[in-house]
Image: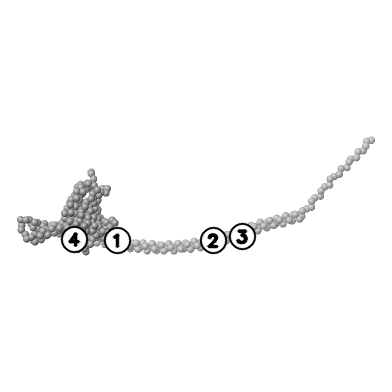
């Protein structure tokens, strides 16, 4: 019989026991979780408190801004009301002032009209009187001319007296002519008869004429021109009288042993004529007045004879040509002297 085989016994490995239930660990976790939850809660609470605090601050700021806005609005209303009342007052004052100005303007216009009518009446009367003086004066001048006729015998003293009367009658006739011409120029009844004229020749003739009648004054008359010929469109007799008047004035106020200079130059489309002397300076305040009718720089000075017609005529005559006249006094870099400058239009070929 076969041998009975016995099975070899095998050992079963020991089974490790289950770890103990972590009671202590679970409690710690719950505590940690509770602490973490509490910290989050506290953090959230702090955030909410900060937000509430900020909200209260914002609400206070809003209330403060609203109060400030109300104050500003009230102030704006007050200022607007003041502006409205002020505008109403200004508007009323403006209307009153405008009405007053209108009334004043109407009064001034009426007064100006009356003055203009009065001036025209005065001009017409003066023109009539002066015109009527010419005929009897011409008769007197004709009779006085007989004193120069050698066919008539006169006592030497009487002849000299009549000769003086004749010279004065010539001056009176020139004054009457000036007044008539000024009256015509002011009323624009006179028109300059302009023709091309060589001013160099005209001024030379005037200087020579005035040099012969400069009385006993030892005054030198000198003429300078940068060009040998300067042609201008002028009324010859009128400009000749202007030159004679200005040179005669320069002689009248020039001191002895001095020089009177007449200069001619051109500037663009104009001829420029200047007459200067070394006399006393003309006050600035009188620069415009001396060109008025009967105007004089020193009316109280009786040592210098004059009517105040010459410069008024010169101004009107020059302006009738489209030019201008002015006085410069004292002379540059001096404390004395005077220079009268006037312009005339140069001739232009058509």
Badge 2 crowding class, 10 Å Cα cut-off, few under 14, some 14 to 19, many 20 or more, is: few
Q: Nearer the viewer, residue 92 or 118?
A: 118
Secondary structure beneath label 1: helix
Q: Which residue is mark 4?
A: 305
- Residue 1 shown left or right of residue 133 in the figure: right
Taking the image as drawn, is residue 136 in sight? Answer: no
Farthest right residue?
1
Contact (CB < 8 A) between labels 1 and 3?
Answer: no
Q: Disc 1 or 4, which lies upstream in sequence?
A: 1
Q: Disc 4 or 2, which lies upstream in sequence?
A: 2
The Cα atoms of the two marked residues, 3 and 2, are separated by 18 Å
Q: Disc 1 or 2, which lies upstream in sequence?
A: 2
Q: Disc 3 or 4, which lies upstream in sequence?
A: 3
Badge 3 crowding class, 10 Å Cα cut-off, few under 14, some 14 to 19, many 20 or more, is: few
For image coordinates 53% across by 60% down, the residue present is 62
The Cα atoms of the two marked residues, 1 and 3, are separated by 77 Å
Secondary structure beneath label 3: helix
Q: Which residue is mark 3?
A: 49
Badge number at residue 102: 1
The Cα atoms of the two marked residues, 1 and 2, are separated by 59 Å
The Cα atoms of the two marked residues, 4 and 2, are separated by 93 Å
Which is closer to the viewer, label 1 or label 4?
4
Q: Disc 1 or 3, which lies upstream in sequence?
A: 3
For image coordinates 55% across by 62% down, the residue present is 60
Q: Quadrant of residue 131?
A: bottom left
């Amino acid at each position: 019989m076969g041998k009975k085989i016995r099975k070899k016994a095998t050992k079963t490995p020991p089974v490790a026991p289950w770890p103990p239930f972590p009671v202590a660990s679970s409690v710690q976790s719950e505590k940690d979780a509770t602490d973490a939850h509490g910290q989050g809660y506290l953090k959230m609470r702090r955030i909410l408190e900060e937000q509430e605090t900020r909200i209260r601050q914002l609400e206070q700021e809003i209330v403060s801004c609203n109060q400030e806005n109300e104050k500003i609005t009230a102030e704006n209303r007050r200022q607007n009301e003041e502006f409205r009342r002020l505008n109403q007052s200004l508007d009323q004052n403006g209307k009153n002032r405008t009405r007053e100005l209108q009334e004043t303007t109407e009064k001034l216009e009426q007064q100006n009209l009356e003055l203009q009518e009065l001036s025209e009446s005065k001009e017409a009367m003066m023109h009539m009187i002066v015109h009527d003086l010419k005929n009897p004066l011409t008769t007197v001048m004709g009779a006085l001319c007989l004193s120069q006729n050698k066919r008539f015998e006169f006592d030497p003293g009487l002849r000299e007296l009549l000769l003086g009367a004749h010279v004065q009658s010539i001056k009176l006739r020139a004054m009457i002519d000036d007044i008539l011409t000024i009256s015509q120029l002011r009323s624009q009844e006179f028109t300059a008869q302009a023709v091309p004229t060589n001013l160099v020749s005209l001024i030379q003739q005037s200087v020579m004429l005035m040099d012969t009648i400069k009385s006993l004054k030892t005054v030198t008359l000198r003429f300078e021109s940068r060009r040998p010929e300067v042609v201008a469109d002028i009324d010859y007799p009128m400009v000749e009288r202007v030159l004679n008047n200005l040179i005669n004035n320069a002689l009248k106020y020039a001191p002895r042993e001095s020089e009177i200079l007449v200069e001619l130059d051109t500037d663009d489309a104009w001829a420029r004529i200047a007459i200067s002397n070394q006399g006393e300076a003309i006050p600035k305040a009188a620069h415009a007045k001396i060109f008025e009718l009967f105007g004089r720089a020193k009316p109280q000075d009786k040592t210098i004879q004059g009517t105040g017609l010459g410069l008024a005529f010169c101004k009107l005559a020059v302006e009738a040509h489209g030019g201008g006249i002015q006085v410069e006094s004292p002379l540059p870099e001096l404390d004395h002297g005077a220079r009268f400058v006037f312009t005339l239009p140069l001739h232009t070929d058509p």
